[in-house]
Amino acid sequence: MCLAIPGRVVGLNPEQPLLARVEVGGVQRNVNVGLLEDGVADGDWILIHVGFALSKIDEAQAEDQLRMLRGMGEDELAIEEIRGYSFADVNGEHDEIRR
Amino acid sequence: MKYVDEFRDPAVISGVAREIAREVDPARHYRIMEVCGGHTHSIYRHGLRDVLPENIELVHGPGCPVCVLPTGRVDDGLGIASRNHTILTCFGDMMRVPGTRGTPLELKARGADIRMVYSPLDALKLAQQNPDKHVCFFAIGFETTAPSTALTILRAQALGVKNFSVFCNHVTIVPAMRAILDSPDMRIDGFVGPGHVSTITGCRPYEFVASDYGKPVVVSGFEPLDIMEGILMILRQLHAGEAKVENQYKRIVPWEGNAPALRAMATVFELRPYFEWRGLGFISQSALSIKPALAQFDAEALFEIPGVRVTDPRGAQCGEVLKGVLKPPQCKLFGTECNPEHPIGALMVSSEGACAAYYRYAVHAETVTT
């Protein structure tokens, strides 16, 4: 529930300033960056929770956080959560909403 | 020390464990509450009990969102799903939480349109895709999650979505800590403070614990080393006769918190006069509701919500466990009628629930000192 998942920003779309494409464990999805004071840039690391970036972190912190999730046995769950985000289009395709 | 291999650095952990052993006063009994369910999970998963001196008692706190939601609110939320042309959405953790008439998963199997989402924004998208239906999001969580719900509501407003609402059950951690401190049957010496909640709130809100109650708070991360360091920092404060808020989790938690997130919460939510917590009862100003200006997105304003109080299932002692008065194995149903496959109480559902953590990592034999 309180998972905070580290991800790297891999793409921004000027037409959708509230979204950033992130990669987590090889899975790419869009997340909302409306909770970050100064937005994000390509290559930034962020902590993600329920579809929103909670904070910007550095790479070492991201590794820390990933190791923590692994230690808690929640790394698979984290990737499943990222894969589950379906609110924004990726590569112009609509993600499936699960029934 | 069966999980010691999984520690980041067993030598470092052993070092901190030795320092803790040196620090403790053998004549004293310490009760330290880890506020977060995430901490509880980590403590049992990594077998930290086994590396701590016996006179340090860890008391599990209320920081598990599905655990503190009373059955009456679960029923109220599930009632929304029984309306015509309505889709109820909730996080995965909620899907297995028992209401009086079953869990969301069971109700779904009986035909209710209940869907799991990973983000409130997924629920909003579902509303846009189903203009002939109403989509309600069953929102739960502490300050970690509340800002996301707030931004989703503002997004719905900006997009002019008319068929979306939120059944708001967001709670705030500080009033719960105050209730525990005020409770006559609870004696807590110090708190391992919340990790991810504090990324939003910062550390300042805990200052009353130190100033008004004279107890240390150390905001800590979730790795074994973080929690051990947090405990050591609490012991050092206690022995120095100090009480202050310290931040062990500086690498993630800024002292001031997340300003845009706090602004979003202030824009969308207001404090409820009171809210019922499982185990802790009614706590004043401990939960958030949607402001009247955004009532069109508030399920409680749109629909009639019965608001019935429901006691815990017969025999289940979730409340006592949540308050830290009982340890999970002391509950009559623990491990027998109530287990992770068939949870009777919410604490057996989520990995952050104390009962599920105990059960999964099989520490039935812990010395009980209450």
Image: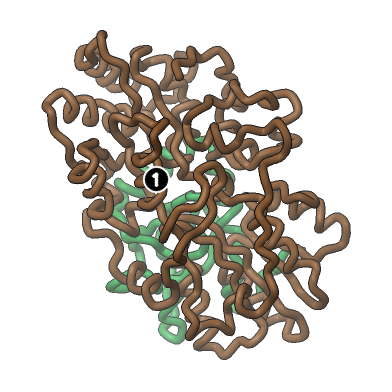
Chain colours: A green, B brown
Tag 1: amino acid: Ala
Of helix, strand and loop, which one carries label 1?
A: helix
Of all residues, the one furthest to the bottom in this rendering is B160
Q: Position of residue B340 (x, y in %)?
A: 69, 34
Label 1 resides on the chain identified as: B
Q: Position of residue B175 (x, y in %)?
A: 38, 52
Q: Residue at x 62, y 32 (%)?
A: B317
Q: Residue at x 43, y 41 (%)?
A: B36
Q: Position of residue B177 (x, y in %)?
A: 37, 45
Q: Residue at x 68, y 58 (%)?
A: B308
Number of on-image labels: 1
- Seen in the image, is B23 located left or right of residue B29? left
Of all residues, the one furthest to the right in this rendering is B110
Q: Specify the quadrant that holds the C terminus of chain B.
A: top left
Does residue B236 lie above or below B173 as drawn? above
Q: Specify the quadrant that holds the N terminus of chain B.
A: top left
Of all residues, the one furthest to the front in this rendering is B184
Of all residues, the one furthest to the top in this rendering is B26
Q: As rendered, which of A1 and B78 lies closer to the eye?
A: B78
Q: Residue at x 17, y 30 (%)?
A: B237
Which residue in the structure is indicated by mark 1? Answer: B179
Does residue B4 lie above or below B218 as drawn? above
Q: Is residue A62 visible?
A: yes
- Seen in the image, is A99 located left or right of residue B119? right
